[in-house]
Amino acid sequence: MQEEPAWTMGIEEEYLLVERDSGNLITKQPPGLLEKVANLRHGLVARELFSSQIEIGTGVCTNARELRADIGLLRLAVTEAAAEYGMVPIAASAHPFARWLEQEYTDAERYQALTAALQGVSRRMVISGMHVHVGIEDPDLRIDLMDQVAYFLPHLLALSTSSPFWEGRDTGLKSYRLTVGEALPRTGFPEKFESWSDFKRHVDVLVKAGIIEDSTMIWWHIRPSERYPTLEMRVTDLPTRMEDTIALACMYVCLLRMLWRLKLENRRWRSYANFLLSENLWRAERYGVNGELMDFGKGVLVPFGDLLEELIELVQPDAEALDCVEEIEHTRTICRRGTSADRQLAVYHGAIAEGATTDEALKAVVDALITDTLAPPRA
C-alpha cells in the first residue's frame, strides 16, 4: 500500500494595517513594527508588496488545533505590536475605501525588482490573500493532486470572499481581489502536467530565459512549492474571522486526502478544461455562497449550499482521519450566515438605511472588520 502523505498544514495571512481612529489604510509602515511582531512570535512575519501590509506564517502544523493556536498567537502579536503605533490589523482582501495610488511600496529588494518588471500593473495590487500549504512529500503526487483539486477551488473561494468594495464603491462582486490579481502574468488555473519533471521542464524555460528567478514568480491559484514539499492553495480571499480560516484550510486538506483515497482505488476525479473551471470561479467571485455553481458531471447549475453538503459528505472519512470534523462542519455556518463580504455589505447598507453618509457607512465597515479580525478563537 502506498505510504500516506503527512498532510501537515501551514497558513500565510496578509493583513492590512489601518489607523485605529480613522480606519484609513496606512501609507507608510512605522520603523520597527516588523521586529516587534517577530519578537512576540518567533520571527514568522514578513513584509509584503506594500508598506500597508504585513504577512504572517504559521509553523508546520499537524492538526487543526495547532493551526488555530498559531494563527491566534500571530494575530495577537500583530495586534499588540500595531497598537503601539495607533494601528490595528484587518483581515480582508481589500480595504473598503483606500486609494491604491496613495500606497507606498515596501523597500525589500525582491519587491523592488518585481515592481520594476510589472510597472503600472503592480500599483493596483493592494490586495491580500490567504495561502494554505499542505505537506505532500512525493513531488509527482503533488502534481497529480494539483490537477484534480483544481475542480474545487471555486468552492473554496466562495467560502472565503472578503473583498466586495474597491476604492469606496460596492463592486457588485463578493471577491473583487481576483479581478485585480488577474492583471498579473502567470495567474489563473495551472496548466495540466504529467509529472513533477514535466512541470519543472516548463518552469525552467522561463528561468533559463531570465524571465523569472524560480517558480515562486508563478502566481497560479494553486501551485507546487519548490521551497517546501507542499501543494500551496492561493485562490482564496482572506477570511476575516479566524475560525473561517481554519475551516477552509481543513476543507482543502480533506479534499486532497479524499483524492488520494481515490488514487489508492485506481480512480481519480474527472479533469475539466480550465475555461469551464474559470466559469465556476467567476460565479464564486460574483455571488459567493449565495449563488450557484455548475455541476459539470450533471450539466446543471446547483445552489452552493447543496454543493457544500455534497462536499462535506465526500470528505467525511478524511475529516475523521485528520480530526477536523468540527472544522469541516463549520463551513455550514459560513454558508448560512455569509462570508466576510456578506457581513461588510450588510453593515454598509444597514448604515445607509439609517441615514449614514457613504463615508460613515464605509467607516462602519472597517470597524466591523476590526471587531471580527480580533474576535477571540474558539476554546
Image (cartoon, helix red, strand yellow):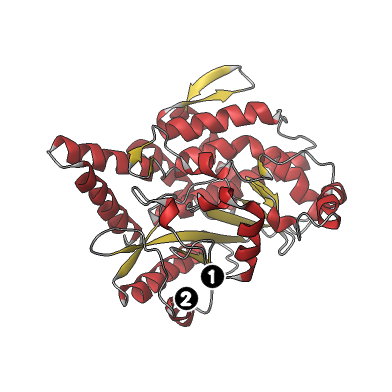
Q: Is residue 1 visible?
A: no
Q: Secondary structure at mark 2?
A: helix
Tell me where residue 271 sits by quadrant.
top right
Q: How far, Cα to Cα, is label 1 from label 2? A: 7 Å
Residue 236 lies, in percent from the top left, at 52, 46
Question: What crowding class fits label 2: few (fewer than 14 Cα within 10 Å), some (14-19), or many (20 or more)?
Answer: many
Give the position of the C terminus as an image quadrant: bottom left
- Counting other residues with Cα less than 10 Å from the Cα at mark 1, is it few (<14), some (14-19), or many (20 or more)? some
Q: Is residue 130 left or right of residue 87?
A: right
* Residue bearing the label numbered 2: 34
Q: Label 2 near label 1: C-beta < 8 Å?
A: yes
Look at the picture and state if 352 lies above or below 13.
above
- Image location of residue 198, percent across then percent down: 86, 47
Is 96 on the left-hand or right-hand side of 124?
A: left
Q: Residue furthest bottom?
A: 39
Q: What SS does tag 1 mark?
A: strand
Residue 58 sits in quarter:
bottom right
Q: Say which of 348 and 207 sits in front.
A: 207
Q: Of the residues shown, which amino acid type is indicated by label 2?
A: Leu
Amino acid identity at mark 1: Ala
Q: Which residue is labeled 1 in the image? A: 46
Quick one: 323 or 140, which is closer to the camera? 140
